[in-house]
Structure formats: C-alpha cells, structure tokens
Image (cartoon, rainbow, N blue to C red):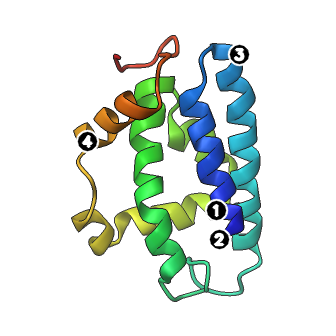
C-alpha cells in the first residue's frame, strides 16, 4: 500500500502543477512510482492481479484512481495515459486493464464529469498546452 500511496501522491503533484515545467518534473516522479508497481507485478508467478489470480483489496483500492488517471490526465495535462505512460510498463498495463474491465469496477465508476469537477474545485489551477479541458 505504501507504493500505491506514492502513485497517488505523485499523480496529485502532476494535477497541482502550476507550470509546464512543473508538470514534466512531477510526471517523471509519477512514472517512477508506477514503475515500482510494475516491478511488483513482474514478481508474480501467475494471474494478472497483485495476488496472482485473485482480485484483492489492493485492486479495489486502486480502481477509482486508475479510472481518474484515464480521465483527468488527458483533460488537464494533455497526457494520453495509455499511450504515453502505460505502454512503458507491460505488467502494469495488463493489471490496470484487468481492473478497468472488471464488471464491478465498471458498475461503480464515478461519472467523468464528477471527476473533472472535483479536480477543478480542489487541485487544478493550470491547464497544460494541448490539453482538451478547460478551467
């Protein structure tokens, strides 16, 4: 859980950045934190989840965050999460795909408008060039 906390902390750093220079610096830290999760996933012997073939509490905790990454990073930072980040990590990409495609995660997904509104209200004060969103 400590490694996942670093992922969420660095994700918020990317969102709270106030310049493109800050975005790039924090994006690097975010990528490093994701690499640590990818390394954990590489140590599994079977299955696509952190505990192998069992969907666990770790995936339940991670699901809403992963959904946010896909919505908010392109909207506010112009970062295609899959293409620019996940494609660098084979195991992480598979793991996050399995989580996002799980019916219970799909059914409990927060509406995109709510994710964006919360970020505007609490975190984002700078919109990256090329981002599709607005403040």
Q: Left or right: where does residue 105 sit relative to residue 45? A: left
Q: Is 85 located above or below residue 95 in the figure? A: above
Residue 98 in picture, x, y percent from top left: 45, 69
Asked whether 126 or 132 is in front, the reply is 126
Query: Which label sits on residue 1?
Result: 2
Q: Which residue is mark 3?
A: 21
Q: Which residue is mark 1?
A: 4
Tell me which residue sits at (54%, 88%) in the image. 53
Q: Tell whether label 2 touches label 1 (CB within 8 Å).
A: yes
For mark 1, give the secondary structure. helix
Q: Left or right: where does residue 62 sit relative to residue 42? A: left
Upstream in sequence: badge 1 or badge 3:
1
**Mark 2 Cα within 10 Å, few/some/many (few <14, many 20+)?**
few
For mark 4, give the secondary structure. helix
Query: Marks 2 and 3, how far apart in space?
Result: 29 Å
Tell me which residue sits at (64%, 87%) in the image. 46
Q: Which residue is mark 4?
A: 114
Residue 114 in picture, x, y percent from top left: 25, 41
Query: Marks 1 and 3, how far apart in space?
Result: 24 Å
Q: Left or right: where does residue 76 sit relative to residue 50? A: left
Instruction: Answer with the quarter of the image where residue 92 lies.
Output: bottom right
Query: Marks 3 and 4, how far apart in space?
Result: 27 Å
Q: Residue furthest top?
A: 129
> Where does the C terminus fall, quadrant-wise?
top left
Instruction: Answer with the quarter of the image where residue 64 lies.
Output: bottom left
Asked whether 109 or 81 is in front, the reply is 109
Q: Is 21 located above or below residue 32 in the figure? A: above
Tell me which residue sits at (35%, 71%) in the image. 102
């Amino acid at each position: 859980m400590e490694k996942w906390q670093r992922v969420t902390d660095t994700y918020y750093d990317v969102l709270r950045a106030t310049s493109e220079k800050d975005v790039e610096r924090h994006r690097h830290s975010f990528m490093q934190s994701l690499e640590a999760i990818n390394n954990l996933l590489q140590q599994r012997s079977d299955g696509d989840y952190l505990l192998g073939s069992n969907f666990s509490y770790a995936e339940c905790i991670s699901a809403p965050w992963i959904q946010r990454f896909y919505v908010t990073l392109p909207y506010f930072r112009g970062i295609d999460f899959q293409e620019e980040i996940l494609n660098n990590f084979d195991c992480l990409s598979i793991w996050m795909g399995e989580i996002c495609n799980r019916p219970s995660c799909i059914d409990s997904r927060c509406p995109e408008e709510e994710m964006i509104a919360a970020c505007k209200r609490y975190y984002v004060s700078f919109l990256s060039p090329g981002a599709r969103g607005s403040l």
